[in-house]
Structure formats: structure tokens, C-alpha cells
Image: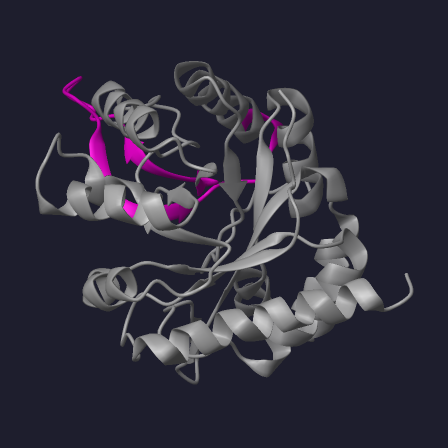
Amino acid sequence: MQIDSGHGCAGIGLRQPHYAEALREPPALGFVEVHSENFFADGGAALAVLHAARERWPVSLHGVGLSLGSAAGLDAWHLDRLARLVQRIDPVRVSDHASFARAPRQSGAAPVHASDLLPLAFTEASLDILVANVQRVQERLRRPILVENLSAYLRWADDALPEPAFFNALARRSGCGLLLDLNNLVVNALNDGVDEVAAACAWVDAIDPAIVGEIHLAGYHDAGDIVIDDHGSRVHDNVWQVYRHALQRLGPRPTLIEWDTDLPALPVLLGEAQRAAQCQRVAQQEPA
């Protein structure tokens, strides 16, 4: 399967408090993104809103529940609901995370779901599991998906592969693409106590540009002893620095402003998307 990295455009995460205003006077956006699991019902108001949004903009479906890295395998019900939603909406992209949330019970009962995005060990064994699960999803959806790099607050002792090499191998073996979350790279570097801009730019330099299908930008919260990826504020200046570097390295990519907590007025969110679009325009004018 071939990942279409597309051309540069900017979008926003479409959240419930902004539904009415955004649909009443649709802003000029490259796309909107929604969380897939919020629209799994066969009908109702939420699905009606998503259909209305699809008439106005391309829609990207971003999931949090597939548990692509789970050794317990995928939840068949979850995958079926996602497939039905993809068929209904015909999204421009489908994505989820390089994480696990499902684990087997010792009793042999159905796996337990942690309702969290737990980090994977960067090992050959984890890669094998992730490849198999991604391939199953893609076969069911009949399209390639994007897999997002994670913000993680712990690392596994048996990590053996550099994270970019892990994603390069995942894409090569499964045919999927990468949803490159630059905010997550910065958050992880800050929590590691290293120069966040240099570390994130080095990560970007190590990835195969051909696999990057979308970029995420977001805000984070510095709690003093830990930096939290809370998607609750404007994009920080250091993330914008990494974004400008990524555009020079990768070329234009569809870019999403993620804002999920402490939602601002819609014009504030649109202003962040406009800044991303402006960065893309400047990057296209600069010599390589």
C-alpha cells in the first residue's frame, strides 16, 4: 500500500463546543479531524454532525482505542465499528497510536482495556506485534492507516531500537504511514532533560520523509517535575521551531492543531491553524 503524503494544508480538531459555530459559518480549512470512537453509534446527533462536517471539509478520523501494539490482539467489535464509520464518511485519513491498552487476564476471560495510551517497548518483538495488528486493520479498512508516535512518561528497560528506526521499519513492513506528532517529541525530550529542539529535530531527520502523512501540533503543560501532553493551550514556540525544521526536511504535510482541554474560542483555534498554514507558505518559498 502507498501512503499519499498529500500537500500542505492546515486543519483543526473539531470538538463539540465548536460544532454549531463552525457549521453555521464554515471557516476555510484544509480538513478537520475528529476522534473516531465518538461516532461509532449507528445514528444520532453526533453522527449527523459528522456528516454535515463531511459536506464542508475533508475529514480525518483519529482513534485512541485500537490498541495497535497489544499482544492480546485487536478488539473485533472496535475494528468493525471503525470500518463502518470509514465506509460512511470516506475520510481523507485514518490514524491511531503506537501504543497498547489491552492486556489478557490470567483467568482467561476477555482482555482488560486500560483506557490509556501505554507506550511500547522498542524491540523486535513489539515491532512484530505492531506490524501484524496494523496489517489486520488495513486489510479490514482496505486502506493504509497512519500510526502516531507517542508522548511517554516511562521507558522500557529492554528498548533496543531507536524510535525513528522503529517507525521506519513499521512503515516498510506494513505499508502504513506515520502521523508525526511534533509536540510529543518535544514533551519527551523535556522530560528526558535534554535540549528539546535539537532532540526533536534529530528525530525528524532520522525518519523516512516518504512515510509522513500528517503532522500534529499542540500545547503542553509544564508542571515543574514533569511536562504533560495535555493539548490545552497554544502551540509553544519550541514546537513551532521544530515544525519549521520539519517542513524544510519533509516538505509540506497536512498539519493539525490539536486542542482538547480548556478549549478556547473558535477564532483562537483558527488562528493557530492559520499560523501553521503561514509556516508552510514560507517554507515553500525558501530554498531547500
Q: Residue at x 53, y 30 (%)?
A: 126
Whether residue 92 is situated above or below residue 151 in the rendered picture: above
Residue 279 vs residue 236: left or right? right
Q: Residue at x 30, y 24 (%)?
A: 79
Q: Is any atom of residue 258 visible in this view? A: yes
The answer to which of 217 and 13 lies nearer the viewer is: 13
Query: What is the count of numbered marks?
Result: 0
Which picture quadrant has residue 21? Answer: bottom left
Q: Is residue 98 magenta?
A: yes
Q: Position of residue 143 (x, y in %)?
A: 50, 22
Q: Residue at x 47, y 21 (%)?
A: 138
Q: Position of residue 241 (x, y in %)?
A: 68, 75
Assess whether residue 217 is covered by the magenta stretch. Answer: no
Q: Is residue 130 above or below residue 266?
A: above
Residue 14: name its quadrant: bottom left
Residue 95, how many percent across, how many down?
45, 39
Q: Nearer the viewer, residue 63 or 193?
A: 63
Q: Residue furthest bottom?
A: 224
Quarter of the view holding residue 24: bottom left
The residue nearer to you, when weighing 16 against 222, is 16
Asked whether residue 162 appears in the rendered view, the answer is: no
Above or below residue 57? Residue 274 is: below
The image shows residue 4 at horizontal and vertical percentages of 64, 34
Q: Which residues are magenta?
A: 96-125
Q: Which image quarter is the C terminus in?
A: bottom right
State left or right for residue 276 relative to residue 197. Answer: left
Which residue is at a point 35% across and 74% down the rendered structure image? 232
